[in-house]
Image (cartoon, rainbow, N blue to C red):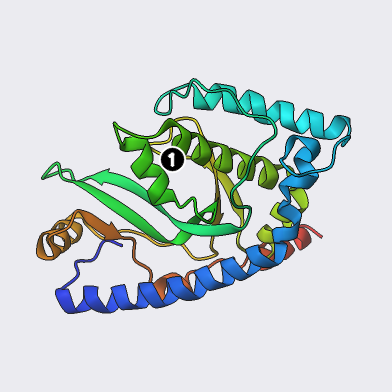
Amino acid sequence: MTQAFDVEALIKLRLQTRAISDVLRAQAADYLSTLTPLLRPQALFGEYLQGAPRGSGRETQHHFRELKELYDRVASASPFQLVSELEVPLSLVSTTPELFPVEYDIVLAQSGQTVRITSPTRWVVGFNSFDLAGFRKVVRDPNRSSAELYRFVVHYLVLFQCLSKAAGLSRLLEGLRFPVTYERLKDFGDLPFCVINSPLTASLPDESVIRNSTQIAGTSSFEELVGRDNILGMNDEIRERLLRTIEGL
């Protein structure tokens, strides 16, 4: 988006963005809820999970070993710097997945102002009771509780392992046009997050619009925008795939 927005146009586009985002998020959450049985940590980690039956076999040993190697690499490094080892058996407070908006920072070229941007069409998958904003707050707190930080790190790593190992689930979500990607986010070091993307792409207006909007609102945050033009410009992956299939026949 390169055109300039007046206040009324920006307000209208924000209203459209929120309405579209609500529909997409509800759809993504419904798909995720339906597919939640495929994310069972007990099936992946067996006896290494608190309350699970013993004697789960070599496969669960392999999965736990991978989780431990990932934890040892991620948790000991900045910004977590945890000295505690991965506890066995794993104690999970929650295993119900929830969606949290993707957030990132940009620096405006002219003013040098840092603005926190929220995506209305992309979401980080986490277990409920372990929201992303709360995780970020704990990471940034100089007086943080190591035990609380440990719980956040473990829950997000367990979810990453469960989702990344469920190849069929990823293919299903991609077929439903809500593909999963695995990304690193600023403030969280090398910890991999699972991100669900919608079939619609949001974008940012010119920096002048962001600057004026944040100054008027008295905040340092802004949301990507999406409207009618974005909907009309959506790609149909199945259509494109079929067209490629018959090319040259």
Badge 1 marks a residue whose secondary structure is loop
Residue plotted at (24% across, 56% down): 221
Judge by depth and name the residue closer to the eye, 149 or 106. 149
Residue 60 appears left or right of 97:
right
Residue furthest front in the image? 51
Residue 243 visible to an observer of this rendering: no
Residue drawn at the location 56% of the way across and 56% of the way down:
196
Residue at 54% in and 72% down: 26
Q: Is residue 241 left or right of residue 124?
A: right
Q: Could you say where residue 23 lies in the image, as x and y percent from the top left?
A: 50, 76
Above or below — where is 111 with respect to 191?
Answer: below
Image side of residue 232 versus residue 156, left or right: left
Give residue 97's quadrant in the image: bottom right
Q: Residues within 10 Å of mark 1 (few under 14, many from 20)?
A: some
User: Residue 19, relative to residue 116: is it above or below?
Assistant: below
Quadrant placement of the C terminus: bottom right
Task: Check the picture and name the quadrant holding the N terminus.
Answer: bottom left
Q: Amino acid at mark 1?
A: Leu
Q: Nearer the viewer, residue 113 or 75?
A: 75
Total residue callouts: 1
Vertical position of residue 133 compared to residue 34: above or below = above
Q: Residue at x 70, y 67 (%)?
A: 34
Q: Position of residue 47 (x, y in %)?
A: 80, 37
Does residue 238 show up? yes
What residue would you read off at disc 1? 185
